[in-house]
């Protein structure tokens, strides 16, 4: 296994307390708002599947389908999915999944969020490189999305309290 081709890792320092970051990760509806998937009324429960319609422009025809692995309050949230499974006519169900893990760590200025997606070396050769590249780009965007979502929700709350 080659770590460089098997895993994507991103880190971002979010200038809010760990509890706030956890809320937008572990609450399915909030997660969906910044991640781009409709998860109204859904919950993340370890060992259970969670599905929702993708709301990201150009991908609305797809169903987001993940198996939640771990929900350790304010520490770790992880799920398995089929990376870059975007062709509606392809059955990805027999393929191996990748593991997406969100880890939180307290820092002086806020919370360090580390996202790791691993297991690409097990994805079929024919689509492994594209899945890796597209998810790599996607995680760059999602780090920006969660940061902006947290900034906006903090400002909204401050305005409501005025």
Image: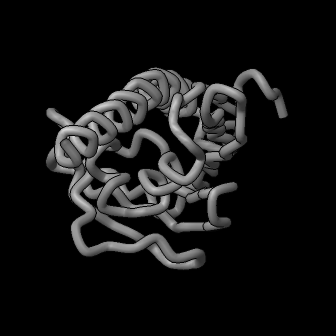
In this rendering, is residue 72 above or below 111? below
- State the residue at coordinates (70%, 25%): 5
Q: In this figure, what is the number of numbered marks?
A: 0
In this rendering, is residue 105 above or below 141? below
> In the visual, does 22 lie left or right of 1?
left
> In the visual, does 72 lie left or right of 127?
right
- State the residue at coordinates (64%, 29%): 8
- State the residue at coordinates (25%, 74%): 41
Question: Residue at the front extreme?
Answer: 162
- Residue 118 position within the rendered picture, expressed as x and y whole percent measured from the top left: 68, 41
**Front-most of residues 149 and 121:** 149
- Residue 39 position within the rendered picture, expressed as x and y whole percent measured from the top left: 27, 63
**Front-most of residues 2 and 106:** 106
In this rendering, is residue 57 above or below 119? above
Quarter assignment of residue 52: bottom left
Q: Quadrant of the C terminus?
A: top left
Q: Quadrant of the N terminus?
A: top right
């Amino acid at each position: 296994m080659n770590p460089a081709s098997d895993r994507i890792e991103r880190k971002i320092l979010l200038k809010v307390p760990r509890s706030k970051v956890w809320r937008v990760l572990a609450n399915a509806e909030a997660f969906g708002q910044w991640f781009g998937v409709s998860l109204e009324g859904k919950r993340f429960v370890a060992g259970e599947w969670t599905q929702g319609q993708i709301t990201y422009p150009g991908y609305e025809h797809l169903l987001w389908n993940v198996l939640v692995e771990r929900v350790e309050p304010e520490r770790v949230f992880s799920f398995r999915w089929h990376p870059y499974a975007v062709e509606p006519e392809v059955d990805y169900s027999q393929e191996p999944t990748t593991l997406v893990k969100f880890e939180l760590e307290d820092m002086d200025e806020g919370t360090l969020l580390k996202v790791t997606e691993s297991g690409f070396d097990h994805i079929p050769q024919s689509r492994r490189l594209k899945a890796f590249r597209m998810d790599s780009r996607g995680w760059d965007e999602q780090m920006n999305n969660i940061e902006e979502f947290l900034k906006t929700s903090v400002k909204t709350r401050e305005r409501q309290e005025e």
